[in-house]
Protein backbone atom coordinates (compact mmCIF):
# COMPACT_ATOMS: atom_id res chain seq x y z
CA UNK A 1 0.00 0.00 0.00
CA UNK A 2 2.80 2.44 0.79
CA UNK A 3 4.51 1.56 -2.46
CA UNK A 4 1.39 2.60 -4.40
CA UNK A 5 1.33 5.86 -2.49
CA UNK A 6 4.95 6.50 -3.38
CA UNK A 7 4.29 5.80 -7.06
CA UNK A 8 1.37 8.20 -7.03
CA UNK A 9 3.54 10.87 -5.40
CA UNK A 10 6.31 10.26 -7.93
CA UNK A 11 3.84 10.58 -10.80
CA UNK A 12 2.39 13.74 -9.33
CA UNK A 13 5.87 15.16 -8.77
CA UNK A 14 6.81 14.31 -12.36
CA UNK A 15 3.81 16.26 -13.68
CA UNK A 16 4.59 19.16 -11.40
CA UNK A 17 8.11 19.39 -12.84
CA UNK A 18 6.90 19.75 -16.44
CA UNK A 19 7.12 23.31 -17.72
CA UNK A 20 3.73 25.07 -17.76
CA UNK A 21 3.81 25.48 -21.54
CA UNK A 22 3.97 21.73 -22.07
CA UNK A 23 0.65 21.31 -20.30
CA UNK A 24 -1.04 24.38 -21.79
CA UNK A 25 -4.49 23.82 -23.24
CA UNK A 26 -6.07 26.06 -25.83
CA UNK A 27 -8.61 28.53 -24.59
CA UNK A 28 -11.97 27.17 -25.75
CA UNK A 29 -15.09 29.26 -25.35
CA UNK A 30 -18.65 28.94 -26.61
CA UNK A 31 -19.91 31.96 -28.50
CA UNK A 32 -23.24 31.99 -30.36
CA UNK A 33 -23.22 28.19 -30.45
CA UNK A 34 -19.70 28.03 -31.94
CA UNK A 35 -16.74 26.64 -30.03
CA UNK A 36 -13.79 29.00 -30.38
CA UNK A 37 -10.28 27.59 -30.00
CA UNK A 38 -7.65 30.27 -29.39
CA UNK A 39 -4.12 29.05 -29.91
CA UNK A 40 -1.85 29.25 -26.87
CA UNK A 41 1.95 28.92 -26.78
CA UNK A 42 3.10 25.35 -26.49
CA UNK A 43 -0.12 23.80 -27.79
CA UNK A 44 0.25 21.87 -31.00
CA UNK A 45 -2.98 19.87 -31.39
CA UNK A 46 -6.53 21.14 -31.62
CA UNK A 47 -9.56 18.83 -31.90
CA UNK A 48 -12.77 19.96 -33.57
CA UNK A 49 -15.94 18.76 -31.93
CA UNK A 50 -19.51 18.23 -33.04
CA UNK A 51 -21.00 21.40 -34.47
CA UNK A 52 -19.17 24.47 -35.73
CA UNK A 53 -15.68 25.27 -34.44
CA UNK A 54 -13.51 28.34 -35.02
CA UNK A 55 -9.72 28.04 -34.69
CA UNK A 56 -7.94 31.38 -34.14
CA UNK A 57 -4.20 31.74 -34.78
CA UNK A 58 -1.98 34.81 -34.53
CA UNK A 59 1.71 35.61 -34.85
CA UNK A 60 4.17 33.18 -33.23
CA UNK A 61 1.58 30.41 -32.95
CA UNK A 62 4.12 27.66 -33.62
CA UNK A 63 3.45 24.41 -35.47
CA UNK A 64 -0.14 23.28 -34.94
CA UNK A 65 -2.35 20.38 -35.96
CA UNK A 66 -6.13 20.51 -36.33
CA UNK A 67 -7.99 17.20 -36.36
CA UNK A 68 -11.66 16.61 -37.03
CA UNK A 69 -11.95 19.76 -39.16
CA UNK A 70 -15.19 19.89 -41.18
CA UNK A 71 -14.85 22.39 -44.05
CA UNK A 72 -18.63 22.74 -44.26
CA UNK A 73 -19.00 24.16 -40.75
CA UNK A 74 -15.59 24.88 -39.18
CA UNK A 75 -13.38 27.94 -39.75
CA UNK A 76 -9.76 28.95 -39.33
CA UNK A 77 -9.10 32.60 -38.56
CA UNK A 78 -5.62 34.05 -39.01
CA UNK A 79 -5.21 37.36 -37.17
CA UNK A 80 -2.56 40.04 -37.53
CA UNK A 81 -0.13 38.11 -39.72
CA UNK A 82 1.71 41.00 -41.40
CA UNK A 83 3.39 38.79 -44.03
CA UNK A 84 0.07 37.28 -45.10
CA UNK A 85 -2.57 40.05 -44.96
CA UNK A 86 -5.10 38.52 -47.39
CA UNK A 87 -6.72 35.17 -48.14
CA UNK A 88 -5.13 35.15 -51.59
CA UNK A 89 -1.62 35.43 -50.14
CA UNK A 90 -2.27 32.74 -47.52
CA UNK A 91 -3.83 30.44 -50.17
CA UNK A 92 -0.46 30.41 -51.98
CA UNK A 93 1.03 28.92 -48.80
CA UNK A 94 -1.37 25.91 -48.67
CA UNK A 95 -0.09 22.52 -49.84
CA UNK A 96 -1.75 19.12 -50.05
CA UNK A 97 0.05 16.30 -48.25
CA UNK A 98 -0.86 12.63 -47.83
CA UNK A 99 -2.06 13.52 -44.31
CA UNK A 100 -4.10 16.63 -45.09
CA UNK A 101 -3.45 20.25 -45.90
CA UNK A 102 -0.39 22.15 -44.73
CA UNK A 103 -0.43 25.94 -44.29
CA UNK A 104 3.16 27.19 -44.15
CA UNK A 105 3.21 30.67 -42.67
CA UNK A 106 6.90 30.88 -41.68
CA UNK A 107 9.78 28.69 -40.52
CA UNK A 108 8.29 28.75 -37.03
CA UNK A 109 4.54 28.94 -37.75
CA UNK A 110 2.46 26.38 -39.62
CA UNK A 111 -0.91 24.66 -39.42
CA UNK A 112 -1.65 21.13 -40.60
CA UNK A 113 -5.32 20.34 -41.12
CA UNK A 114 -5.60 16.54 -40.98
CA UNK A 115 -8.04 14.76 -43.24
CA UNK A 116 -8.69 17.67 -45.59
CA UNK A 117 -8.01 17.87 -49.30
CA UNK A 118 -7.03 20.47 -51.82
CA UNK A 119 -9.97 22.78 -52.37
CA UNK A 120 -11.44 22.21 -48.88
CA UNK A 121 -10.16 25.56 -47.62
CA UNK A 122 -11.86 28.55 -49.21
CA UNK A 123 -12.26 32.22 -48.33
CA UNK A 124 -15.37 31.26 -46.33
CA UNK A 125 -13.57 28.90 -43.93
CA UNK A 126 -10.01 30.31 -44.01
CA UNK A 127 -10.47 33.90 -42.91
CA UNK A 128 -7.63 36.42 -42.72
CA UNK A 129 -8.12 39.43 -40.43
CA UNK A 130 -5.74 42.36 -40.05
CA UNK A 131 -6.57 44.73 -37.20
Image: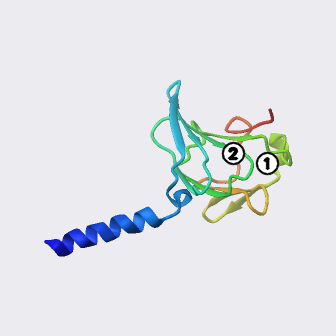
Image position of 31 (left or right of 1) = right
**Circle 2: is it few (<14), some (14-19), or many (20+) Cα within 10 Å?**
many
Residue furthest out toward the left: 1
* Horizontal and vertical percent position of residue 120: 66, 46
* Horizontal and vertical percent position of residue 18: 48, 65
Numbered circles on residues, count? 2
Q: Is residue 82 above or below residue 103?
A: above
Residue furthest out toward the top: 32
Per the model, the C-alpha gap separating discs 2 and 1 is 8 Å
* Horizontal and vertical percent position of residue 65: 59, 56
Which sits earlier in the primary sequence, circle 2 or circle 1? 1
Rendered image quadrant of residue 75: top right
Helix, strand or loop at mark 1: helix
Q: Is residue 105 above or below residue 98?
A: above
Residue furthest out toward the bottom: 3
Q: Is residue 130 above or below residue 95?
A: above
Image position of 33 (left or right of 56) = left
Residue at the image point whose x is 52% and y is 53% from the top: 24
Circle 2/circle 1 CB separation < 8 Å: yes
Residue marked by disc 1: 91
Residue marked by disc 2: 121
Q: Which of 76 and 108 is in front in this view?
A: 108
Considering the image in quadrants, where does the C terminus appear? top right
Image position of 3 (left or right of 22) = left
Considering the image in quadrants, where does the N terminus appear? bottom left
* Horizontal and vertical percent position of residue 113: 62, 54
Amino acid sequence: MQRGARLLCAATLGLALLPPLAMAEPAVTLRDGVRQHVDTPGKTMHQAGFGPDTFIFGPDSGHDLITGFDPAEDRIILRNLERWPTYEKVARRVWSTPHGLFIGLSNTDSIRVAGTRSGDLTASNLIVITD
